[in-house]
Image: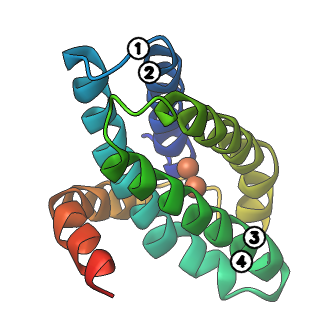
């Protein structure tokens, strides 16, 4: 039985690999386009599913509020950089510099989730021994994956 903690960590490892590969890309190359698309869709769906199935529950507990608010605020900051990178043009000379800021911030965020948030969640929520949170997370992530483009367009129109 996998738990929500296993699922989130597995996603993070995939995102760490993609960040490292992307840092080695140059210009408007097929490699950069493909890796960025893989990263963008998976991270957006991951963060939305975390907020809806994980942080919403932690937020509802008095001892979890600060941690949950902090993480959700970081999601918003990273989302802003991701949208910036998405519209900037892959051949823009500033792309990689901006990407490296995202890489640094996101690596820190993942580490914090794994080292601090997980222990808070295990205390205030559950250790997910029956995998029910994992199930909800995966289900939500699949739905969010389909909504990524719609949500990005809606936020541009705001
Ligand atoms: Fe997160
Ligand atoms: Fe995460």
Residue 18 versus residue 120: which sits nearer the camera? 18
Quadrant of residue 157 within the rendered picture: bottom left
Between disc 1 and disc 4, the foreground one is 1
Q: Alpha-carbon neighbours of circle 3 within 10 Å: few (<14), some, or many (≥20)?
A: few
The residue located at (69%, 48%) in the rendering is 109
Residue 77, position as x, y percentages in the image: 61, 63
Q: Which mark is residue 69?
A: 4
Residue 154 versus residue 1: which sits nearer the camera? 154
Gap between marks 1 and 4, in whole Å?
34 Å
From the viewer's perspective, tell me whether residue 66 is left or right of residue 52: right
The residue located at (50%, 62%) in the rendering is 80
Gap between marks 3 and 4, in whole Å?
4 Å
Q: Which of marks 2 and 3 is nearer the N terminus?
A: 2
Does 94 sit above or below residue 151? above
Q: Mark 2 = which residue?
A: 22
The residue located at (59%, 72%) in the rendering is 55
Q: Are circles 3 and 1 on residues that touch, CB within 8 Å?
A: no
């Amino acid at each position: 039985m996998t738990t929500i903690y296993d699922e989130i960590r597995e996603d993070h490892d995939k995102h760490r690999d993609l960040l490292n590969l992307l840092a080695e890309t140059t210009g408007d190359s097929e490699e950069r386009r493909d890796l960025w698309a893989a990263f963008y869709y998976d991270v957006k769906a991951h963060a939305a599913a975390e907020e809806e199935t994980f942080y919403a529950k932690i937020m509802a507990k008095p001892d979890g509020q600060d941690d949950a608010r902090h993480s959700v605020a970081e999601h918003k900051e990273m989302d802003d950089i991701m949208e910036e990178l998405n519209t900037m043009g892959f051949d823009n000379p500033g792309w990689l510099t901006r990407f490296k800021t995202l890489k640094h911030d996101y690596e820190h965020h993942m580490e914090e989730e794994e080292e601090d948030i997980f222990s808070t969640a295990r205390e205030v929520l559950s250790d997910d021994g029956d995998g029910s949170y994992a199930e909800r997370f995966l289900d939500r992530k699949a739905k969010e994956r389909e909504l990524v483009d719609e949500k990005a367009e809606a936020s541009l129109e705001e």
